[in-house]
Amino acid sequence: MIWCAAVLPNTNTNSMNRWFSCFLFNIVTPAHIVRLYDRFEALDKEKTGHLRPQDFGAINRLAMNPIGDRIIGAFFSPGQETVDFHSFVRILAHFRPADKKRPKDPSMPEPVNSRTSKLKFAFQLYDQDKDGKISRAELLQVLRSMLEMQVTEEQLESIADRTIQEADLDKDDAISFEEFRKSLEKVNIDHKMSIRFLR
Amino acid sequence: MPALWRSTFVLVMVLLAISRPSLASEDTGNGTENTITTLPIVIWKWEEIHFPYLVALWVLVSWLCKLVFQLNPCLTRVIPESGLLICIGWVLGGIIYGADKVQTFRLQPFTFFFYLLPQIVLDAGYSMPNKLFFGNLGAILVYAVIGTCWNAATLGLALWGCWLGGAMGNIDTGLLQLLLFGSLIAAVDPVAVIAVFEEVHVNEVLYILVFGESLLNDGVTVVLFNVFDAFVSLGGAQIDAVEIIKGIISFFVVAVGGSLVGVVFALLISLLTRCTKNIQIIEPGFIFVLGYLSYLTAEMLSLSAILSCTFCGVCCQKYINANMDERSVSTVRSTMKVFANGSETIIFVFLGISAIDPSIWVWNTAFILLTLLFIFVFRFIGVFLLTWILNQYRLVPLDFIDQLVMGYGGLRGAVAYGLVLLLDENKYKEKKLMISTTLIVVYFTVMLQGITMKPLVTWLKVKRAAVSERTLAEKIQNRTFDHMLVAIEDISGQIGDNYMRDKWNNFEEKWLYWLLMTPIARKSCDPIFNIFHKLNIKDATSYVKEGERRGSLAFVRNESKADVDFNKKFGADFSEMMPYIMTENMGPDHVPVSSILRDSVPSVCLDMHEQDLKMRESEDFDAHHLLQQHLYKGRKQHRHRYSRKHLEVNKDEHEVQEIFQRTMRSRLESFKSAKMGVAPPKKISKHLKKDQPQKMPNGKSADNSKSHAYGDEDLEFSEGDSASGCEAAGGSFPMRAYRGAGIVNPAFMAEMDTMDPMPPMQQIPSWLAEAEVDSSNMVPSQRAQLTLPWTPSNLRRLAPLCLSTHSNDSFLLADSPATQEGISELPPPPPPQDGQGQGTHK
């Protein structure tokens, strides 16, 4: 506790408590929290303790990212305009490599960096209207932004159709989460959705 | 087993043929000196050609050895191929030694380094999985550079220690010489390991680490070898700190410089392939010549030739594969493999042959055994140590099993042997001992470790690679993951791998693509788009395969040819269809695919006609007559033209035109008939009626000839495509049977008409009906495609080309009564029956 206070001198006790819940759930290590807090403060230009979408938008390189706005959107739970440090860490913790050494404890809630929750995170990037399904239009939007100018609309559409066909098991012309998970069964999600520095 | 003996016999005969002339050459040598007194009709010119002749024969013999093993798969399953080749090398060497009493043939270092090795290296570089390689480049470099230095240094020092301790008796050597020996034997040769890995599909990270390491450490070994060789020449007394530092600097200059030369050559190749469109025939040749030149140039500059060649291959592959014609790419691929595999075989055979020569053997038990022990132990220590360090930084740590396999995979190979032969006997008094030790080490590791590798990998349950079938969803998702990781790194303010990769990708897209790729290639190089294209092709191929399995009645009688024939035929149809599909589905600007495929139409079809004609002429005059009507008259005059410049020798505009017109005509006809809901088109039914009486006795032939009419094939193809996906064929082939049955017997057709409550639906091919009925259910893109007519009149004919997920059921519905009827009426064509059975099970 003393150590934390030393690291983060200007946090109030309330956010401290929530901050500790990060520890409790063991989602990131203290070293990460220190680094992420620095980053959080750097992003939080107006020192409000909350980040707004504009703060994310200020990251230059993020603006170049075709799905950057979706990623930003993922930080904000529906209806909320701001994100505090706790949620900030929680979201980023999705990208922590899974810890194989930690024994599986069924009583604990599923860790935020498990395969399923990683996949959920990826899924909701597509599923913008949050109806639990990736519709054709939603897929098309993502494809359009990722493939940029290289292909025509026609081609995009047939690619989208084909993709949905591949994954769509119940023939409802949309990809549900289950189908999404099935289609990526062979992909090592832990390798693909992890960032080294969060180890 | 008899096959094995037979080929062994052949081998021995060839061998005798080789060794005999070398004896005989002395006699003939005398003979040619005589002045001729009369005009000889033929003369024996062995002297003039004996060198190339021997080379060619040796290549042949080596490859025959491989053939011998492949005849006996249970042998290759237990012993790795390299080990077997060495064994047969021993046998061959024994025979030669027995015949000549001296070992005439030996692997010369010059031959090895300048003719055999470059091919292997270039191939390895060219077929390196790029993304994996660069993704793990750090680890690979650590293993290749530090690992090799570690191996060399520890072995040299340990041997030196033992030598000082007097364990080896009286041999004339020293620290530097032992270090040199250590460095030359440090390189890991993975041929056997890679073969095992490929067989059991170990996880890709382990694979790339071993593969990349083995490739790069060959280069590193050569560099180390040269540095130590120079040290030995200088002599122990003159080596001070400055010289050592110079040595270290030269090590890095040689390694990095070599790699840079390779990159420069890669740029050159890529630039060159931008403009070789018009000389497609020698296009692949450029790759080989420039790749070889990169090797030689680096060697000339005394830089690392192996690294140069490797990086040349690694860097250019992406651009040249995009730039070159698809056929050239496959030519390059397969030719590379021929060369690489060929020279690998030769190397191993000669490794065996070289051993059968008493003059090179010097035995020193302590030296040899200690070397074996140290190599084994220090390899493990090195791997564990380096992996431990690497694991501190890796996102995905290497687990213990992987490390164990990596350590155990430390086989030594031909590079060590080539290097040890380079030693100067005046400087190295113990050269022979070193050679024998190297040979023993190579044999020991290749044989023992090679044989035990596979059981070990299986026993340790090394993580296997997921057999990933590349799907669009996966590919797209991979792309999303990449973007996601970059975004997260940006947000969390870290500069990590993903950041670097993103930077590089941007740079590559902005500059390298512009510089190194043709504009057309640039357009289609997107991986998502590529995989989409490949999947479409795969669908079509699986359709063909499926058709072959179920409905290939035409080839029932000609089983041996069935494979080739059918593929060719459908290939032609497919490529003919391709332009439509492409323009339909992908918009008009997808140039490369359609143009490539269109190019290949004529020659392919022509082949097919030849095949078909031969078949029918001999078997069936009537069918021949029918075919004559459907084929063009002019093709014979193009058949035998020879050209060195073009692949499509028989390309003829008229032919393409005619194919197109015929296709369109028959389509229109069948469309009309389908649309009207009346009896089948006059033209087709006329042929068939005419054929009918003669055909009935041998049953299926009516169907055969039917399947050769172009238009008909096209129709079937489009049906298959409309159902897109693996089930396509399942749906469409019963359909084919239905039409075949219906058309052959007009009476039956009429009956069916009256029987059926809804004749138009029965007559309209089900997909068409589908298109009409279901158009409201269609996804917008399909509707969009409907409004994109080829010509107004055949708009509807083209409609089925677009993807539809619903068509399967209706196929089954439409054809099931028909096929059943057909069975009762006709000698049943069995494959459609199968299709039917499967269909109903579904």
Image (cartoon, coloured by chain):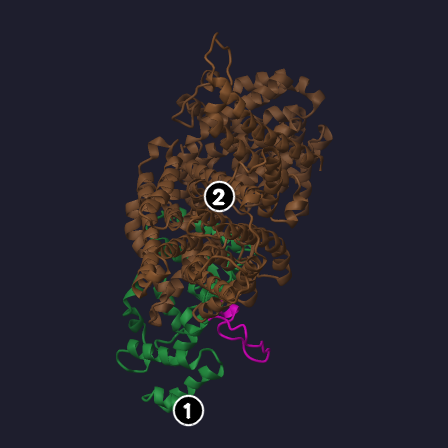
Chain colours: A green, B brown
Q: Are marks 1 and 2 on the same chain?
A: no
Q: Position of residue B643 (x, y in %)?
A: 41, 22
Front-most of residues B559 and A73 = B559
User: The disc labelled 1 sits on which kind of residue?
Assistant: Met
Check disc 2: other Cα within 10 Å, few if <14, some if 14-19, many if 20+.
some
Q: Residue at x 44, y 86 (%)?
A: A20
User: The disc labelled 2 sits on which kind of residue?
Assistant: Asn
For the residues labelled 1 and 2, the Cα–Cα distance comes to 60 Å
Q: Residue at x 38, y 26 (%)?
A: B645
Q: Position of residue B486 (x, y in %)?
A: 37, 64
Residue beneath disc 1: A1
Residue B392, which numbered label? none
Residue beneath disc 2: B536
Range of residues picked out in magenta: A97-119
Q: Position of residue B565 (x, y in %)?
A: 57, 29
Which residue, as the protein is rendered here, is positioned at the far left? A46
Dot 2 falls on a residue whose secondary structure is helix
Q: Please determine whether, in this image, residue B204 is positioned above or below residue B494.
A: above
Dot 1 falls on a residue whose secondary structure is loop
Which residue, as the protein is rendered here, is positioned at the far top? B38
Residue B167 belongs to the span the image colors magenta: no
Which residue, as the protein is rendered here, is positioned at the far front? B170
Give the left or right position of residue B244, taking residue B66 as reference: left
> Can you see residue A43?
yes
Q: Residue at x 63, y 19 (%)?
A: B689
Q: Indicate the quadrant where residue B814 lies.
A: top right
Front-most of residues B280 and B595 = B280
Q: Position of residue B139 (x, y in %)?
A: 43, 62
Choose mark 1 or mark 2, whichever is in front: 1
Check disc 1: other Cα within 10 Å, few if <14, some if 14-19, many if 20+.
few
